[in-house]
Image (cartoon, grey):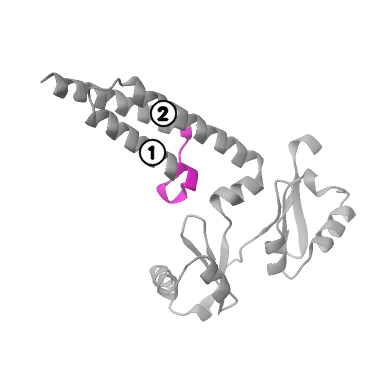
């Protein structure tokens, strides 16, 4: 009976603790969770389950690891906010799967993404043929973002957090040298000063970081 009471009290306390921690971590849809988020949630669940399975152990032995995991997630979120390179390592970058009606076979192999997966996700978006598709991006979440030829075309970031996105430049058939030259014409001598830059309607649009405005 004492064990049942202990388990009941621990369940309530852990529930409250986990709700508070998840609120601190911020709002995200399940499909938008990063790899670190998923790992943290899985370990938290295991730690909580261990506490309920072993009522003889002190509750503090479960609370401490959960709080440590919270700090790990907050630290990783901070670095993700500050560093594009860190985000790319942890979350990855969208991958072009279809470009102007052509399937990017090499990119599919890199992502271990097969034709069955592709056609299923196209059908789910009522796309009957790949030739209807201008661009299709496999997002880090696993979702497929599809643009038809007559849709407004996707705008790619050429600079993100001061880092040139070379892969995006290749898609619009431009080079790093071209981008740096165009930015200098706009009075920007260092790409690291740029928070965000895109190429729309044949011209560069940009926003400087707060420290350089």
Q: Quadrant of the C terminus?
A: top right
Instruction: Using the image, determine if residue 84 lies above or below residue 18.
Output: below
The x and y percentages for residue 83 are 66, 43
Choose between 175 and 63: the one closer to the eye: 63
Residue 177 visible (yes or no): yes
Q: Position of residue 10 (x, y in %)?
A: 25, 23
Counting from the top left corner in percent of width and height, residue 85 is at 65, 48
SS for tag 1?
helix
Does residue 43 sit above or below 102 in this rendering? above
Q: Which residue lies at the image location 58% right of the left edge and 56% below the top edge?
A: 93
Rendered location of residue 101, percent (x, y): 56, 79
The residue to which callout 1 is attached is 43
Q: Disc 2 designates what residue?
A: 65
Identify the magenta region. 25-37
Contact flag, marks 2 and 1 (Cβ < 8 Å)? yes
Residue 27 left/right relative to 62: right
């Amino acid at each position: 009976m004492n064990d049942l009471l202990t388990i009941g009290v621990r369940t309530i306390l852990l529930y409250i603790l986990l709700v508070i921690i998840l609120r601190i971590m911020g709002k995200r849809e399940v499909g938008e969770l990063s790899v670190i988020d998923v790992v943290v949630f899985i370990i938290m669940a295991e730690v909580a389950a261990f506490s309920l399975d072993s009522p003889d152990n002190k509750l503090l032995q479960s609370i401490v690891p959960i709080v440590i995991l919270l700090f790990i997630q907050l630290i990783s979120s901070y670095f993700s906010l500050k560093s594009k390179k860190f985000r790319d390592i942890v979350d990855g970058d969208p991958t072009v799967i279809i470009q102007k009606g052509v399937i990017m076979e090499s990119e599919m192999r890199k992502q271990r993404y097969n034709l069955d997966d592709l056609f299923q996700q196209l059908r789910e978006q009522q796309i009957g043929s790949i030739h209807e598709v201008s661009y299709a991006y496999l997002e880090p979440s696993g979702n497929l973002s599809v643009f038809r030829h007559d849709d407004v075309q996707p705008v790619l970031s050429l600079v993100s957090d001061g880092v040139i996105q070379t892969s995006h430049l290749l898609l619009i058939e431009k080079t790093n040298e071209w981008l740096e030259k165009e930015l200098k014409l706009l009075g920007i001598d260092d790409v690291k000063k740029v928070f965000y830059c895109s190429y729309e309607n044949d011209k560069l649009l940009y926003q400087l970081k707060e420290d350089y405005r």
